[in-house]
């Protein structure tokens, strides 16, 4: 579930090439909304609700609900608020982070990141887990 929300909130959102420009143009905003809607529709845990959320966020954009956003931060906050209000899902959020997008598009060969395998798996406080005969608890 975490990975789904991470993908929706980052990869889906920003296919933006410039990492230094913070101004949001209408074209960038429309591209971002199109990508957000596409990924929510394709990846949301409930396909029907995902389609409804995607349609709603596109309609809100078409009606100009996000037009006042002049920075990515303002855009992030507005779209996040709209997603959470409509979907009643506090897990959904939007964040402009080109570095995360780059990492998701080009994963490191060592498997580092949010993945709890390899070296990260050994940090668990649970050393062993097994079923014991006659254990009724």
Image (cartoon, helix red, strand yellow):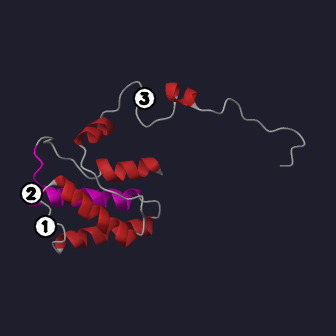
Residue picked out by circle 1:
67
Q: Is residue 43 left or right of residue 35?
A: right
Single out the residue that lies furthest toward the right: 134
Q: On residue 111, which mark appears?
A: 3
The image quarter containing residue 43 is: bottom left
Mark 3 or mark 1, whichever is nearer to me = 1
Residue beneath the point at 17% across and 75% down = 63
Q: Is residue 33 left or right of residue 114?
A: left
Q: Position of residue 90 (x, y in %)?
A: 42, 62
Q: Position of residue 51 (x, y in %)?
A: 37, 68
In terms of secondary structure, where does tag 1 sit? loop
37 part of magenta stretch: yes
Q: Earlier in the sequence, mark 2 or mark 3?
A: 2
For the residues labelled 2 and 1, the Cα–Cα distance comes to: 9 Å
Can the viewer see residue 95 in this picture? yes
Residue picked out by circle 2:
25
The image quarter containing residue 27 is: bottom left
Residue beneath the point at 42% across and 69% down = 88
For the residues labelled 2 and 3, the Cα–Cα distance comes to: 35 Å
Can the viewer see residue 52 in this picture? no
């Amino acid at each position: 579930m975490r990975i789904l929300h991470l993908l929706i909130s980052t990869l889906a959102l920003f296919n933006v090439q410039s990492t230094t420009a913070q101004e949001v143009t209408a074209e960038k905003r429309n591209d971002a909304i199109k990508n957000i809607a596409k990924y929510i529709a394709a990846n949301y845990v409930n396909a029907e609700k995902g389609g409804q959320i995607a349609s709603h966020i596109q309609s809100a954009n078409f009606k100009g609900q996000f037009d006042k956003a002049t920075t990515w931060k303002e855009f992030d906050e507005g779209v996040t608020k709209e997603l959470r209000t409509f979907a009643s899902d506090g897990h959904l959020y939007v964040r402009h982070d080109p570095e995360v997008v780059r990492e998701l598009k080009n994963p490191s060969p060592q498997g580092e990141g949010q993945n709890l395998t390899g070296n990260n798996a050994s940090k668990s406080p649970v050393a062993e887990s097994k079923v014991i005969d006659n254990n009724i608890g």
